[in-house]
Image: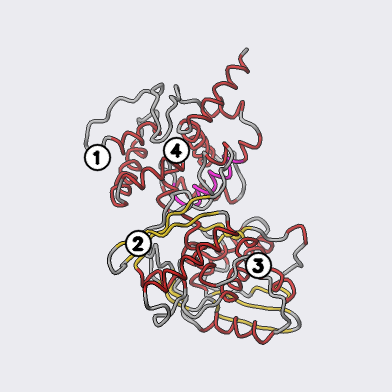
Amino acid sequence: MKKMKESAKPVHLRKHVAAVHIGSVGFNLLHRKAINAAIWFAQQEAREIAGGDLESYLNKTDGIEVNHSINFKEFRQYINYNSNDHEYLKNIFRDLSQLAVEFDLIEGRRSWEIMPFLSYVKFANGMITWSFRSEIRRSILDPDVYAKINSEIVNQIQNDIAFALYENTYRYVNIGKTPWLKINTLRQLLGIAKDAYKETKYFTRVLKQSMKQIQKVAGITLEMEPTGKPIKAVRFLVRANQQPDLLIEQHVVQEQSDVEAQLSHFGFTPNQIADIFNAYPLDYIQSKINFLNKRARAGGIRNFAAFAYKAFEDDYVENTFTPKLSKTESMPALTAKNSRGDKMSFIEIFAVATPEEKDSMKRLFESAFRASQPHSLNKREYDYAYNQLMNNDWSGAELKKSFEEYVEGYVFMRATYSSEIRNRLKSAAK
C-alpha cells in the first residue's frame, strides 16, 4: 500500500455494526485499536486498487482471502503505539488470528457468526501484512450499515472497557438510547470476563468510570438505566454534549440502524425518529415500515411524507380506507410546532439551496440509500440505482428519481428549514 500522506491522516472509520457489537472477552485496549487500524488501512488499499469501482473489485475477489499491507511505522501512528516492542504487537495480532469473536451481539437477528477476526498475519521487512476471513471481508471493506468511528477520539480513551462502551453506544446518539442489554450480553460487548466484577456494585462502578471518561473526551453523555432487582438488563441514554447547528440538528447522522434508515427514507427527522422509538415498540414500527413500503410500490400517493406520518398516528393497516391527502396538505411534525404549507418540488428546493446544503443532503441520501432500499424503488430498480451511485452517475434515472423524492421529503418534514427555503423562493421571485 502507498504511504499515507500527512494531509490524509485518518479521522473517521466506517465500521460495520456487526464488527462493533462483538463478543470480545480477552481483548484489551490495543487489540481494539489494532482491529480499527487493520480495517481502515484495508479499506483505503481496496479503494486504491479498485480505482473507483469497489463493487466490481469485491465481486471479483469474493470468497478470496486477500492480503493487505502497511508499514509498521504508519500502523503504530494510527493506534498511538509509541513502543518499539514488536513482539508485543505480534502477540496482539496472534490473538486476533486465534481468539474467536462473536459478531453482531445486539442486532444478531440478521445472522449469528463466530470466528477469529484475521486469517493471516505476517511481520517482515518493516511491513505488517494481514487478511480478513473471506466470510466477513466484503462487510469489512464496504459496510452497508456502519458506525462512524472517530479515531482521534478513541485514541484518547485510556481503557478497553470505555473504548468498547463508546463504540457500542455512540451509534445511538440520534435515537437517544440503546436497546435493552442483558447483563451477560453487556459483559461480552465490553470484554469483561465472567469472573470479573461479579458483584453489581463493582460492575456499576466500572461502568460509571468509563462513562465519565467518554463524556470527557468523546462529546457525548451516557446515563445508565437499569431494570430488575438484582439488575437483569440495562440500557444507556445517549446525548450529545454540544448543541449542533441548524442544518446538522435537522438531519440524520451518517451512521444509522436499518430501521432508522428506512424511516429517514420516508422523510422523518432525527427528533421524529426518536419520538417514534419512544412511542411505539419495535415490532409495531417494523410493521408500519412494511405497510408503507407496499403502499409506495402500489403508487397513487402524492404526498408520501404526510401519509407516512398519518400511518403511525392513525395506525393504518392493509385494506383500510386511505384518507385523501392532497399534495397541498400541511402536516404537523411530531416535535415541531410550525406549519409547513405545501410540499415543494425538488426543482424549487435546489434552485435556492446553498451548495453546502446540497452537499449535505446528498451525503445523507447516500447514507440512507446504502443502509436500506428506498420505498419508491423495487429490487431491480434499487440494484440499478446502487450501481449508478457506485459509479457516481447521478443522471441515472433510478438514482435521480430516488434522490429527488428523498430531498422533497427531507425538506417537507423539517419545519424550520422548509420555512427558510420558502422565504428564499419568495425573495427570488421578487
Residues tagged 4 and 3 counted as in contact (Cβ below 8 A): no
Q: Nearer the viewer, residue 160 or 287?
A: 160
For residue 341, side relative to residue 66 (left or right):
left
Quadrant in which residue 33 is drawn? bottom right
Q: Amino acid at mark 4?
A: Gly
* Residue 152 visible (yes or no): yes
Mark 1 and mark 3: span between their CA atoms?
47 Å
Taking 181 as reference, is 269 above or below it? above
Q: Disc 2 and disc 1: Cα gap in Å?
A: 35 Å
- Residue at 54 percent across and 72 percent down: it is 160
Dot placed on the residue nearer the N-terminal end, 1 or 3: 3
Left/right of residue 127 with respect to residue 387 in the rendered view? right
What amino acid type should be assigned to the residue bearing mark 1? Val
| Residue bearing the label numbered 4 | 267
Q: Which mark is residue 226?
A: 2
Name the disc covering residue 287, or none: none
Q: Secondary structure at mark 2?
A: strand
Report the Cα–Cα distance between label 2 and label 4. 33 Å
Q: Position of residue 59 (x, y in %)?
A: 55, 63
Q: Earlier in the sequence, mark 4 or mark 3?
A: 3
Any mark on residue 41, and which? Answer: 3
Circles 2 and 4: CB distance less than 8 Å? no
The Cα–Cα distance between marks 3 and 2, rounded to whole angstroms, is 38 Å
Residue 218 belongs to the span the image colors magenta: no
**Mark 2 near mark 1, Cβ–Cβ under 8 Å?**
no
Q: Write down the residue under mark 1.
A: 317
